[in-house]
Amino acid sequence: MPDLLIELFSEEIPARMQARAADDLRKRVTDGLVEAGLTYAGAAGFATPRRLTLAIEGLTAESPTLREERKGPRIDAPEKAIEGFLRGAGVSREDLEIRDEKKGQVYYASITRPGRPAADLVAEVLEQVIRHFPWPKSMRWGGGSLRWVRPLHSILCILTDDAGEAQIVRLEVDGITAGDTTEGHRFMSPGRFDVSSFDDYVAKLKRAHVILNSEERARHIWQEATNQAFAAGLEVVEDKGLLAEVVGLVEWPVVLMGQIDTEFLDLPAEVLQTSMKEHQKFFSVKNPKSGRIERFVIVANRETADHGATILAGNQKVLSARLSDAKFFWENDLRIAKDGMQAWLEKLESVTFERQLGTQAARIARIRALAKELAPALGADPDRAEQAGRVAKADLSSEMVYEFPELQGLMGRYYAQAAGLPDDVAAACEAHYAPLGPSDAVPSHPVSVAVALADKLDTLTGFWAIDQKPTGSKDPFALRRAALGVIRIVLENGLRLKLDRFIDAQLLRHKINLNAGTAKDNEIDTLEEVLDEIADHGVFGAAFRAVIDKVKAKDNPPETGDGSLLRTVGDMVPDLSTDLLAFFHDRLKVVLRDRGIRHDVIDACLGLGGGDDFALIAARAQALQSVLETEEGENLLQGFKRANNILAQAEEKDGVEYSFGADPKFAKDPTETALFQALEEAEAKIAAANEAEDFAAAMAAMAALRGPIDDFFEAVQINSNQQVLRRNRLNLLFTIRQICLQAADLTRLEG
């Protein structure tokens, strides 16, 4: 069985595209060969900056001969139908066979498709793959029609048999003829050379200063970098993303370590690291004792006679220019920060957050207010939370963050510290963005938690208020991430926090702001006063309605566009709030399922109410799942389902509800009496456990009903001929249902 080697040699392929391209080449070629009737033992794709390579082992030498029997029309069918069948089958009338069937005599054709050599099939498949390769971006060059990521120079395509003899696969694509030669390193090994197999190819490439395997290049870079740093008593800052990118920039990595000028060593380590990574693709090398970034590592693509001294000097010169800019930004920003950051906050008044939701300054005002309201429930100082909310996004106006947006928040912490703000306020400037991804830690300090929740809740309620919700896979404003962030902050900090009133208050703020655009200044002030009063008294019930009525009673109620917003907000906010809470629940299910909790268990706990208290739901779900994993819990569920089904059928048949309370004096069987007593004890235990939020105890008390319920069903006929007994037993089933539903909505459980 021959082995196949393919190389597509071109100008430099962008590093970010190489891994995907190698995988696409492997998948598309192998799929095409299998579809053509060939099989193979294994395939591997490789990429360097100038080549895509595919090696296939154990390819069959030719496709198998295929025999197919095809049924045609009846022999008395119209002539045109018979001729069409002959053309489609590729046979003549003499080749047809007549067979007797129930509906008459029918033509059959036996078709034989001979196998084809692997070389012919490879040529056809590879040509199609090259012409339709899925590059994210591609180009044409010269006068040809072929599109490739960069100009394609040559195609290597050979089949090597078991004896080691190589056969060139003949194909031509846009004037490029396949052969058995390739090139090595652009500078260190110019000229072409022939290859006869994959092993020969890899060995000759290495002699020509090309390491084909990207993983081998990565290991070499990291090993050399860490060895050089270790020799200097330093350590390389690990950055897997940068390593993957650098691997795609070099075919023959040469690792060099340089020194950062002393004038830049006082810059924050993150500024140095970001500047070197983003602009120069340098690795940072830090002093483990001080934590300062003192040196850098570069990866060149060639060896030089002076062992890289010229390369290092040139890069160091460019780096110094870059770091001079960073130092200038840092020093300018520090002057503004020490003045209280007021200039930055004023600048945010002219920066739009979202067209309908207003400026960043307006957003900051909402976050401040919400953070202050959240603080008492989180054990945070309200004034500190408001102060942190005020300055948390001030660094968005700084020159450093303008140059390096990825440093927002982090620079905010540095600037808050420079402004002399309390440590917890400075920490909140950085931590309130977290978590940005599933692996990020959540903020834990109460002030940081307050601002982080306020930021995310303001974003969610804002886009809900303007009806810009995620749809399908589209989520341009990262609202799913914001909701997951809220849930993770609540659960991982063990917060008992009822979010409904905060969500409603923030939705109301947004609606007032959205409708205030046509109001006069004095009317806007009145709306803000109403908002303050609502915040003081809560947003539900009589207090909320009293505020609305108070506005209606004014001689000149505040008009906002299509009429007073507050006349309808009582109907508007609950709908939006309910919809947003459902969105939270969808994300909560994802989080809890990742923790191993069944989806129906989560639904059963959501059905009990308190849906805005995520920690409560999580605790209930964990307790219910633990019970259901026991034999008692599973059997109790079956008993509950049986009781519920019998009761539902009886109520539907009789047209009445059996919920008037069962009476022990009508109990005729000892198991019936025992069940009455067990239910009375369980009800008291479940109520006390729920009150104490000891859900494990509540579930255990419910599971203890398994035995009495089983015995009851085993010994007693529910639908007795005596109507008094029947009604009493059906009422007893209702009692079972009600007591169990206090622990969880078991009707939502499967099985």
Image (cartoon, rainbow, N blue to C red):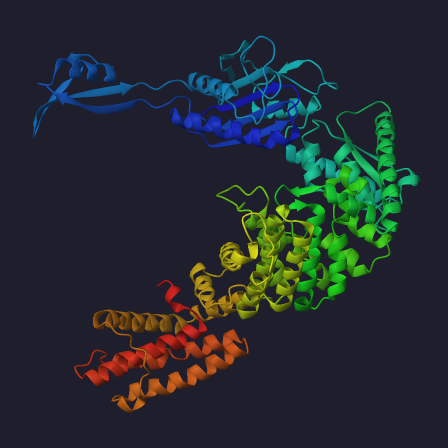
Percent coordinates x, y for residue 20 in the rendering: 57, 32
Front residue of 207/644: it is 644
Taking the spot 31% from the left edge, 84% from the top edge, the residue there is: 662
Taking the spot 33% from the left edge, 83% from the top edge, the residue there is: 661
Farthest residue, direction right: 263
Farthest residue, direction front: 555
Front residue of 705/505: it is 505
Reply above or below: 654 against 402: below
Front residue of 641/387: it is 387
Percent coordinates x, y for residue 104 in the rendering: 7, 25
Residue 638 position by quadrant? bottom left
Taking the spot 92% from the left edge, 40% from the top edge, the residue there is: 263
Question: Does residue 91 appear to the left or right of 457 in the view shown?
Answer: left
Question: Does residue 109 appear to the left or right of 586 in the view shown?
Answer: left
Percent coordinates x, y for residue 600 in the rendering: 42, 61
Question: Does residue 591 appear to the left or right of 649 in the view shown?
Answer: right
- The answer to whether any part of residue 238 appears in the image is no
Q: Quadrant of the C terminus?
A: bottom left
Question: Does residue 647 appear to the left or right of 159 in the view shown?
Answer: left
Taking the spot 39% from the left edge, 24% from the top edge, the residue there is: 36
Percent coordinates x, y for residue 84 in the rendering: 20, 15
Q: Quadrant of the N terminus?
A: top left
